[in-house]
Image: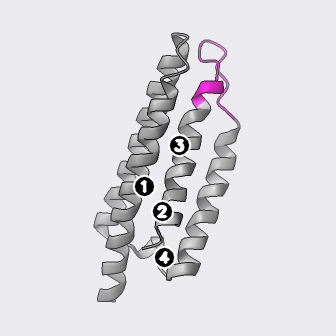
Amino acid sequence: MPWALLSAFGGVAAWWVSAAATADPGEDYQPPTSGWLALVALLVVAYLVRRESGVRFRRMGARAAWATAAILVTCLALFSVSLGFVSFGLRWPVVLTSVAAFGVTTWLAGVAYRSALEQLRRA
């Protein structure tokens, strides 16, 4: 398993969640522009995983799709919690939500990768 690349998914998630620390939530909220860069980084990492292992995430199976959906929901929730902390003037807890995003995303990316490998073996 390419743990370095799966950790890169976690790193991108942590980066995106930590972007909430630079936001100014409130009436004139403007989302961080680094979200687009995180999406590009995510696509680059997905390409590298495909190149290294041959696993295509389009045909990864139901379990991997659920893991990917869980990554998305978890990161959105952690980003929202981070914005809540920042709105109260507490920027330091964003470190904790970012670490949580890294850990959960890396773990669930491993689940999705294993599921994609099983699907590839069955094909």
Q: Earlier in the sequence, mark 4 or mark 1?
A: 4
Q: Are marks 1 and 2 in contact (CB under 8 Å)?
A: yes
- Identified by mark 1, the residue type is Thr
The majority secondary structure of the magenta stretch comes to loop
Q: Earlier in the sequence, mark 3 or mark 1?
A: 3
Give the spatial CA distance, label 4 vs label 1.
Answer: 18 Å
- Identified by mark 3, the residue type is Ala
Q: Quadrant of the N terminus?
A: bottom left
Residue at the spot of label 4: 56
Task: Please determine whether, in this image, residue 42 is positioned above or below residue 51.
Answer: above
- Identified by mark 4, the residue type is Arg
Q: Secondary structure at mark 4?
A: loop
Q: How many numbered dots are placed on residues in this image?
A: 4
Stretch in magenta: 20-32
Q: Secondary structure at mark 1?
A: helix
Rendered residue at 41%/47% (across/down): 103
Give the spatial CA distance, label 2 vs label 4.
Answer: 14 Å
Q: Are marks 3 and 1 in contact (CB under 8 Å)?
A: no
Residue at the spot of label 2: 6
Task: Please determine whether, in this image, residue 116 is positioned above or below residue 31.
Answer: below
Image location of residue 4, percent across then percent down = 52, 65
Q: Secondary structure at mark 2?
A: helix
Give the spatial CA distance, label 4 vs label 3.
Answer: 23 Å
Q: Earlier in the sequence, mark 1 or mark 2?
A: 2
Rendered residue at 39%/69% (across/down): 113
Residue at the spot of label 1: 106
- Identified by mark 2, the residue type is Leu
The label shown at residue 14 is 3
- Looking at the rendered image, the disc whose residue lies closer to the viewer, 2 or 4, is 2
